[in-house]
Amino acid sequence: MRVIRSLLLFKLGFWAGMMAAAAFVKRAVPSRGDEDSDELALVAVMDGIELTNRSKAFKGGSMVAWYGGIAVDLREAELAPDARLSVRTLFGGIAIRVPPTWRIESSVTALAGGVDAGTPAQDDPDAPVLVVEGKALFGGVAVGTKAEAAISEPAARVAEPAAE
């Protein structure tokens, strides 16, 4: 009985510490970028972010989802040369929707999560290239033309304020 109680207290302390750290990060690390930004730095901690980017020279940036979700639509953006996007998830998800003419080079790895990256232009050597790198821990990353499956109605509701 003592071992079980010790394990339960450890687990409770671990989760309380994770939530406290997430609350600190949420206040300390703000998101940067809007629909016209060439570079994004999005941070979703216990929250949701939904963004449509219309940049004329999208260079990339970073995305962090910690107990939250990020949905970015890049179909109206134009890709700059050497565009690079860094993604990190911890118990969260990132969905990036791109035009079918872009080629995706992904080195995202997952631990107890999933990664789906690709477009119809994967075999086109002349297509603009978006390099995506990062990690998904107990979460998921979807990059492609069909990433809208990951941008579901419940995820969209997370980003909206509650109706009163």
Image (cartoon, rainbow, N blue to C red):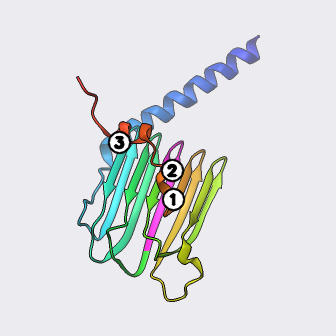
Query: What amino acid type is highlighted by mark number 3?
Result: Lys
Q: Are marks 2 and 3 in contact (CB under 8 Å)?
A: no
The numbered mark, 2 or 3, whose residue comes first in the sequence reads 3
The residue that appears at 57% across and 64% down in the rendered structure is 117
Find residue 40 and report its image quarter. bottom left
> What is the residue that sits farthest to the top in this orientation?
1
How crowded is the residue under tag 2: few (<14 C-alpha within 10 Å), some, or many (20+)? few
Image quarter where the C terminus lies is top left
Main SS, magenta residues: strand
* Image disc number at residue 146: 1
Residue 150 x, y percent position in the rendering: 50, 49
The residue that appears at 55% across and 73% down in the rendered structure is 120
Residue at mark 2: 149
The numbered mark, 1 or 3, whose residue comes first in the sequence reads 3
Find residue 48 and report its image quarter. top left
Magenta region, residue range: 84-94
Mark pair 2, 1: CA separation: 6 Å
* Image disc number at residue 94: none
Residue 140 x, y percent position in the rendering: 56, 50
Residue at mark 3: 26
Mark pair 1, 3: CA separation: 29 Å
Q: Are marks 2 and 1 in contact (CB under 8 Å)?
A: yes
